[in-house]
Image (cartoon, rainbow, N blue to C red):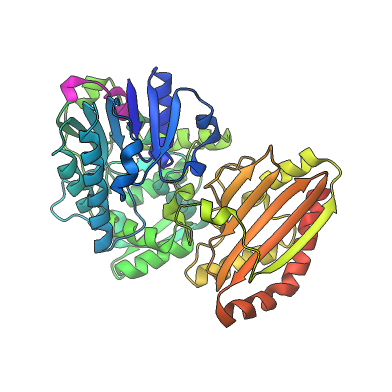
């Protein structure tokens, strides 16, 4: 079949694509910025990328008329305002209208479990999207999941941060909220196995793991899998705002995402039983097995997608990478350095391994201090790290940077700063004729930006000189 996948650069979409190709389908991926498409997928003859924005109906003309099925995987946890809800609804309406003009027989949507009488804004929004999609001239198959557990998922990484950093936790009362976590492997099975099944047309199913657990249970079971002893005391006095700050400062999440998560974690997420597991021959993994499987992927460096690389975790950048690739020349401060390299391949490997647990090769303590300062001012800090220790692609998060150009053949890596700054910053590495060129560019905003540049200039001299020497040798 010819299938349209929306949210193709997202956590679920990126993992679903190879499964669909493996099953013999031709996959059309619609993305807002084609620069964010995975290079391996771009080279596959069974995968085609097209650009389109579901907030701009005129941009959706590129969607082929002959598609036979579509996956709606567009979600956002980065905003909890009224505007967010209307934008999600608008996306769904524009999707429905465009799909109505194609040969699509089935739309498969991944939503959230919405059985509680009091829903978070995000679950209310997903419920509204369901209602919109059901009015289309095609059949819908809707799967509603709760907490998704897998390497790189936001819930997994946040729990990992809490468990591995805090032997003793004084935590909010929402840790006693009940939920049914589901392994990402099982989510992908539901999505891929339901394709083309007419018995599932115009049906909706809650999908969930075999256990009912509180968030506290999840933390303690995670600790047991990791061989750690942890103690948790829940207190009733933490307001949602204090809870959000608690998550924000302790974990790698952004404040906006922390706020949305706290809003959702106050809601009990328990699914309604059905015969879907028997119908699709799926036996959902237990929570502990899902955690163990996630760590196997981490140890093999085979994490396909991570929430950190989505724009949800972005501090400043909002897609449209094109406008940032051309580094400005005028009205900017620059720190440019060049050095002869001994072995360009080894230097290139070092460049592609920079940041995260590998560090920045010089002034690690200063980088960490800068990350702490950024976090204090509401930025993202250094805790995002990187998804892979040696691979980089456009759109990847890299500590408090975002990769906006990465081409090993052209020997060029360009990063854009997402930290809190009175201006904009780029960091570029390029090798030409065995000469490594390292350029930090800062475009200041007003007097504050200029004062900032001159205040950090002494540190730049130490850090950037040391970094380029380490990269070249």
Does the magenta run of residues contain 198?
yes
- Relative to 170, is 206 above or below? above
Image coordinates for residue 143, horizontal then vertical, percent: 24, 35
Image coordinates for residue 213, horizontal then vertical, percent: 29, 44
Image coordinates for residue 249, horizontal then vertical, percent: 47, 65
The residue sitting at 58% across, 57% down in the picture is 416
Does the magenta run of residues contain 460?
no
The residue sitting at 28% across, 43% down in the picture is 146
Of residues 203 and 358, the one drawn nearer to the viewer in this rendering: 203
Horizontally, residue 470 falls left or right of residue 188, namely right
- Relative to 459, is 37 above or below? above
Image coordinates for residue 117, horizontal then vertical, percent: 13, 53
The residue sitting at 48% across, 53% down in the picture is 161
Of residues 156 and 96, the one drawn nearer to the viewer in this rendering: 96
- Relative to 468, is 35 above or below? above
Number of callouts: 0
The quarter of the picture where residue 283 lies is top left
Q: Is residue 83 visible?
A: yes
Please provide the residue range marked out in magenta: 189-200
In the rendered image, the quadrant that contains the N terminus is: top left
């Amino acid at each position: 079949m010819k299938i349209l996948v929306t949210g193709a650069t997202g956590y679920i979409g990126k993992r679903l694509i190879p499964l669909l190709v493996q099953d013999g389908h031709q996959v059309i991926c619609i993305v807002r910025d084609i620069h964010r498409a995975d290079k391996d997928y771009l080279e596959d003859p069974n995968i085609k990328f097209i650009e389109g924005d579901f907030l701009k109906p005129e941009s959706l003309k590129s969607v082929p008329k002959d598609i036979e099925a579509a996956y709606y995987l567009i979600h956002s946890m980065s905003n909890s305002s009224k505007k967010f809800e209307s934008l999600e609804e608008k996306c769904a309406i524009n999707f429905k209208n465009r799909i109505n003009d194609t040969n699509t027989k089935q739309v498969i949507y991944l939503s959230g479990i919405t059985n509680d009488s009091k829903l978070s804004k995000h679950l209310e929004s997903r419920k509204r999207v369901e209602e919109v999609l059901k009015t289309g001239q095609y059949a819908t198959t809707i799967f509603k999941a709760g907490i998704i557990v897998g390497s790189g998922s936001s819930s997994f990484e946040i729990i990992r941060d809490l468990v591995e950093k805090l032997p003793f936790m004084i935590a909010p009362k929402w840790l006693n909220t009940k939920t049914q976590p589901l392994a990402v492997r099982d989510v992908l099975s539901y999505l891929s196995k339901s394709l083309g099944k007419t018995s599932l047309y115009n049906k909706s199913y809650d999908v969930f793991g075999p256990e009912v657990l509180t968030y506290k249970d999840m933390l303690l079971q995670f600790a047991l899998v990791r061989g750690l002893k942890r103690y948790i005391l829940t207190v009733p006095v933490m307001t949602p705002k204090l809870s959000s700050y608690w998550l924000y400062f302790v974990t790698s999440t952004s404040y906006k995402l922390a706020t949305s998560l706290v809003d959702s974690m106050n809601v009990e997420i328990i699914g309604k039983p059905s015969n879907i597991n028997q119908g699709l021959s799926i036996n959902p993994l237990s929570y502990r097995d899902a955690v163990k499987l996630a760590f196997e992927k981490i140890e093999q460096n085979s994490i396909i997608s991570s929430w950190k690389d989505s724009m949800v975790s972005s501090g400043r950048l909002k897609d449209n990478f094109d406008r940032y690739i051309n580094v400005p020349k005028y009205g900017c401060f620059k720190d440019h350095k060049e050095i002869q390299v001994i072995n360009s391949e080894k230097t290139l490997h070092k460049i592609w391994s920079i940041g995260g647990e590998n560090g920045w090769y010089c002034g690690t303590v200063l980088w960490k201090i800068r990350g702490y300062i950024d976090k204090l001012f509401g930025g993202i800090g250094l805790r995002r790290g990187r998804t892979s220790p040696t691979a980089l692609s456009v759109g990847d998060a890299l500590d408090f940077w975002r990769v906006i150009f990465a081409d090993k053949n052209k020997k060029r890596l360009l990063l854009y700063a997402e930290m809190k700054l009175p201006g904009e910053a780029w960091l570029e590495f390029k090798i030409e004729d065995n000469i490594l060129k390292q350029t930090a560019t800062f475009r200041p905003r007003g007097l504050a930006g200029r004062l900032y540049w001159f205040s950090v200039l002494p540190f730049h001299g130490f850090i950037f000189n040391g970094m380029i020497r380490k990269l070249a040798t």
